[in-house]
Image (tube, rainbow, N blue to C red):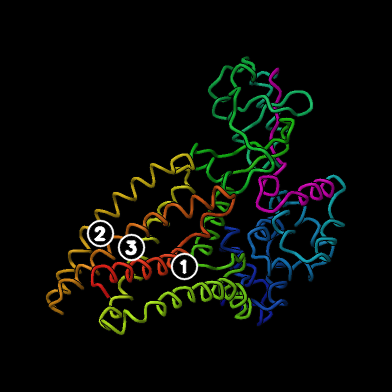
């Protein structure tokens, strides 16, 4: 479809191009048409869309396309597009734009909208305040159900969602929540205050996107009210924004677990220089940390000289230890992210991982002992490697659960203590354990 429309535009057959565009009325899919086009093609295609579809499509475009349109459209073309956007979508867009674009958007906005945008832009990115929309339905508990439904019909046209309505008292203090379903099933003469949920779930403006995502996941919510320090309703977050927050938080954790600096730009749209800059810091740190392992190996060079075969088992011990530590760290980090594991569970987690390590070691150590005895006919070396394997697995599992929880205790992201860092620490420990056991068992 994209190619067909482009060919029609380039052939100056605008009427046919408009008809082709209208075949796809979903604004999400329509927004995908614009990705990767030249600036002049973006503007031409956008101007072919009907005003309502154009406004809806604009909010689903990637920031790069939005910026090109903001630079190319006239004030008269841009104003209705901005007016049709929900407040949270406008804030998300402005957070990605350069200062000159932000100034132009604020200038074109109505005074009330401009004041609201300035207030929302002051919230720290990644918090509930920056995610929320201020377009919600607020009812009074003294209304009857009939009055509330009439109010919805008159005033809820511009609200992002009308299924969940909030009940506020003086100074916008949140007093309850009521859904359209509850109002439809209630008696028309019943009071909103008698039907509403009087203790609704809510979040403060400073709540993080991870905390917001956890609330939606735990309670299967469609919308969440956001309040300030005095319990005044200032906005709401809908489930579609919560899903985006969950996805962004998970992506950030995955990047940190791979020793990457988090990035908001898609992979293919990020330059090689930026990719390198975001990776080289951690790689340099891990490389320098690996020097410790090298120093430990050189410290035991006399043991190598006495029994060179010991060197051949170092990679296996280091890899096994790193893998065991990564397994434990991944499970603990994910458990904390889902709030299945809390800091108070530290000793329970340690006890479980200790038992797991003994069971895993009871399988891997005898296999190594038997393999070494069959291949090298050396029972003492087999015992040395088997004991080293047991101790390495035990330490790796223990550090795999301790380091992420220690990071959480220090108010750091537990994902920082994932695979690369765990592997580096376990490598050094496995070498130290291996050669100390070898010195004693083999009497080197």
Q: Which mark is residue 361?
A: 2
Name the N-terminal-most of marks 2 and 3: 2
The residue tagged 3 is 392
At numbered mark 2, what does the secondary structure look like: helix, strand or loop? helix
Task: Check residue 132 for magenta coloring.
Answer: yes
Pointer 1 and pointer 2: residues touching (CB < 8 Å)?
Answer: no
The extreme top residue here reads 189
Q: Front-most of 113 and 375?
A: 375
Tag 3 near tag 1, CB within 8 Å: no
Q: Quadrant of residue 174?
A: top right
Give the foreground label among 3 and 1: 3
- Could you give the CA–CA distance between mark 1 and mark 2, rounded to whole angstroms? 22 Å
Residue 209 percent coordinates (x, y): 60, 49
User: What residue appears at the point 63 percent right and 70 percent down from the top-left corner?
Assistant: 34
Choose between 22 and 97: the one closer to the eye: 97
Asked which quadrant contains residue 94, the reply is bottom right
Q: Position of residue 159 (x, y in %)?
A: 69, 41
User: Which residue position is annotated with label 1?
Assistant: 420
Residue 121 painted magenta = yes
- When the figure is inspected, residue 180 is found, relative to residue 266, above or below; the finding is above
Distance (Cα) linking label 3 and label 1: 17 Å
Query: Up-down: is 252 above or below 372?
Result: above
Determine which quarter of the picture holds residue 149: top right
Element class at badge 3:
helix
Mark 2 vs 3: CB contact within 8 A: no
Q: What's the distance in space between the residues labelled 2 and 3, CA to CA?
A: 9 Å
Q: Earlier in the sequence, mark 3 or mark 1?
A: 3
User: What secondary structure is marked by label 1?
Assistant: helix
- Of the numbered discs 1 and 2, the one sitting upstream in the chain is 2
């Amino acid at each position: 479809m994209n190619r067909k429309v482009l060919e029609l535009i380039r052939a100056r057959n605008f009427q046919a191009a408009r008809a082709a565009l209208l075949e796809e009325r979903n604004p999400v899919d329509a927004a995908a048409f614009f990705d990767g086009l030249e600036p002049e093609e973006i503007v031409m295609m956008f101007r072919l869309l009907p005003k309502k579809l154009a406004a809806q499509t604009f909010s689903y475009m990637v920031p790069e396309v939005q910026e090109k349109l903001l630079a190319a459209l006239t004030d008269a073309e841009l104003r209705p597009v901005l007016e049709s956007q929900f407040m949270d979508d406008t804030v998300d867009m402005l957070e990605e734009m350069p200062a000159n674009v932000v100034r132009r958007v604020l200038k074109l906005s109505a005074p009330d909208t401009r004041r609201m945008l300035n207030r929302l832009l002051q919230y720290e990115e990644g918090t509930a305040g920056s995610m929320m929309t201020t377009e919600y339905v607020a009812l009074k508990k003294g209304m009857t159900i009939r009055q509330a439904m009439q109010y919805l019909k008159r005033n809820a046209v511009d609200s992002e969602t009308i299924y969940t309505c909030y009940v506020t008292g003086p100074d916008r203090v949140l007093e309850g929540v009521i859904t359209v379903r509850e109002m439809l099933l209630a008696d028309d003469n019943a009071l909103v205050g008698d039907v509403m949920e009087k203790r609704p779930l809510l979040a403060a403006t400073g709540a993080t996107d991870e905390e917001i995502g956890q609330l939606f996941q735990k309670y299967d919510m469609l919308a969440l009210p956001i309040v300030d320090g005095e319990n005044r309703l200032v906005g709401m977050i809908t489930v579609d924004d919560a899903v985006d927050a969950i996805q962004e938080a998970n992506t950030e954790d995955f990047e940190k677990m791979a020793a990457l600096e988090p990035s908001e730009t898609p992979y293919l749209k990020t330059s090689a220089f930026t990719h390198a800059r975001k990776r080289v810091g951690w790689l340099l740190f891990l490389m320098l940390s690996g020097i410790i392992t090298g120093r430990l190996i050189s410290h035991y060079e006399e043991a190598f000289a006495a029994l060179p075969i010991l060197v051949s088992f170092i990679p296996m011990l280091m890899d096994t230890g790193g893998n065991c530590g990564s397994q434990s760290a991944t499970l603990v980090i994910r458990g904390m992210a889902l709030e299945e594991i809390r800091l108070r569970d530290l000793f329970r987690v340690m006890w479980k991982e200790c038992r797991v390590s003994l069971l895993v070691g009871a399988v891997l150590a005898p296999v190594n002992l038997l393999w070494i005895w069959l291949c090298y006919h050396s029972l003492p070396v087999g015992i040395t490697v088997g004991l080293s394997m047991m101790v390495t697995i035990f330490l790796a599992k223990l550090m795999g659960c301790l380091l992420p929880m220690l990071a959480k205790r220090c108010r750091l992201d537990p994902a920082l203590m994932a695979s690369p860092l765990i592997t580096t620490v376990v490598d050094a420990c496995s070498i130290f354990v291996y050669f100390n056991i070898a010195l004693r068992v083999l009497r080197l």
